[in-house]
Image (cartoon, rainbow, N blue to C red):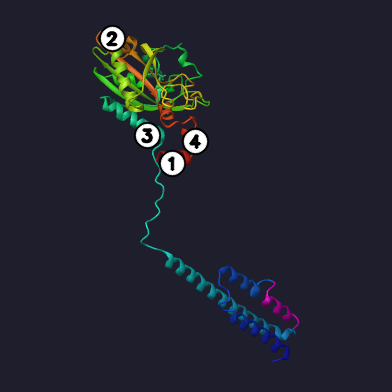
Amino acid sequence: MSEDLKTFVEGLESLALECEARKGQACSLKELEDLRVEFLGRKGKLAANMATLAKLPNELKPEAGRTANEVKNRITELIDGWQADLVAAEAAEKLSRFDPSMPGRKPWAGSLHPVTLVMDEICDILTGLGFEHASGPEVENDWHNFEALNIPPEHPARDMQDTLYVSENIVLRTHTSPMQVRSMLGRKPPVAVIAPGKVYRRDSDLTHTPMFHQIEGLLVDKGVSMADLRGTLTAFVRQLFGTGTEVRFRPSFFPFTEPSAEVDISCVMCAGKGQNKDGSTCRVCKGTGWVEILGCGMVDPNVFKSVGYDPEEFTGFAFGLGIERVAMLKYGIGDLRMFFENDVRFLEQFA
Ligand code: PHE
């Protein structure tokens, strides 16, 4: 073998030996990677040796090239082997720290939405008072949503600003009151139903969302009076907001009830005082001590006529209440939009 080739091969051999001698020095995958670069990298030790190959006479180049390849493979195998050892050792170490007797970390299972919680609670109270649960379509026709409820075609409540029309005669229900009509049609009194669900209006600002939830209540029988309405609603709000809650009826107007009233309860925030403990004005009732929670009234004779009931024989009361409004009061939530943003930090508080 020529002197030149011998020197070249010896150089490569000693490179392989040098690498072997470094066994155990790379204690992490990062250090091992540095070692790989040091020997096999583009500017590494092997590459430096290869630079001298070019200076060999042509007839020696094949032999020299073969040796260089062998050495490169040897070094690669060495480093790959150490890498496999390191990976296995790390896995074994992790396993040794694993305590199978530790209780597992449970994933967060989620929780009911505050609107659902309040809806369920309200339904529980009212079914407890004897009302039965009913549900109906959110896409409603004009007759159920308006006409049968004594809202004639020219009535301002139908204004395009409020109602979301699907077509000329089909709307997204603007309230749960069409369920009054649906509950009475096809059956005779006594009727005592509640109907919770989504309603839609063309309205969107700080205190209005295009979709929100209502619950409708309806009681029809012989001899039902306004006193029954007041008694029922008082029992209801006292279960919902606490026994000390005061109730007040304010005269109002709805086309489908006569007489009609809006119901206020003593403010849940300041207990009806109108001001906070520090003397500042209560922001929930704006100092009045009262907050409005629902609309109600005695079923209008015209509504009875549209469902085929004799208004001389039967009387009844109806009420409708906004669920989000109740949830805001119950949980002290100041911003309606919180209900619809689905921020987990908000929702998880109700778990
Ligand atoms: N439907 C009315 C509204 O959405 C509420 C209501 C229901 C009033 C039943 C009286 C009787 O505002």
Secondary structure under tag 4 reads helix
Q: Which callout, 4 or 2, points at the residue further toward the start of the chain?
A: 2
Nearer to the camera, 237 or 43: 237
Q: Quadrant of residue 40?
A: bottom right
For mark 3, give the secondary structure. Answer: helix
Identify the residue at horizontal 41%, vertical 34% (top origin): 114
Inspect this view and state whether residue 217 appears: yes
Q: Tell which circle, 3 or 4, labels the residue nearer the N-terminal end.
A: 3
Residue 299 is covered by the magenta coloring = no
Instruction: Evaluate if marks 1 and 3 touch, with contact meaning CB atoms under 8 Å apart.
Output: no
Q: Which secondary structure lies at badge 2?
A: loop
Q: Provide the secondary structure element on which disc 1 rests.
A: helix
Task: Identify the residue at image location x=34%, y=27%.
Answer: 242
Quickly name the residue at label 4. Answer: 341
Q: CA distance from mark 1 to mark 3?
A: 13 Å
Judging by the rendered image, the residue that carries numbered circle 3 is 117
Membership of 54 in magenta stretch: yes
Q: Which mark is residue 311?
A: 2
Q: Position of residue 136 (x, y in %)?
A: 34, 26
Q: Residues within 10 Å of mark 4 (few under 14, many from 20)?
A: few
Residue type at mark 2: give it: Pro
From which residue to which does the magenta span run? 43-55
Quarter of the figure with residue 15: bottom right
What's the CA distance linking mark 1 and mark 2?
49 Å
Which mark lies nearer to you, 3 or 2?
3
Q: Which numbered disc covers residue 348?
A: 1
Circle 1 packing at 10 Å, graded few (<14), some (14-19), many (20+), is: some
**In the displayed structure, would residue 250 be above or below residue 350?**
above
Q: Position of residue 112 (x, y in %)?
A: 39, 38
Upstream in sequence: badge 1 or badge 3 = 3
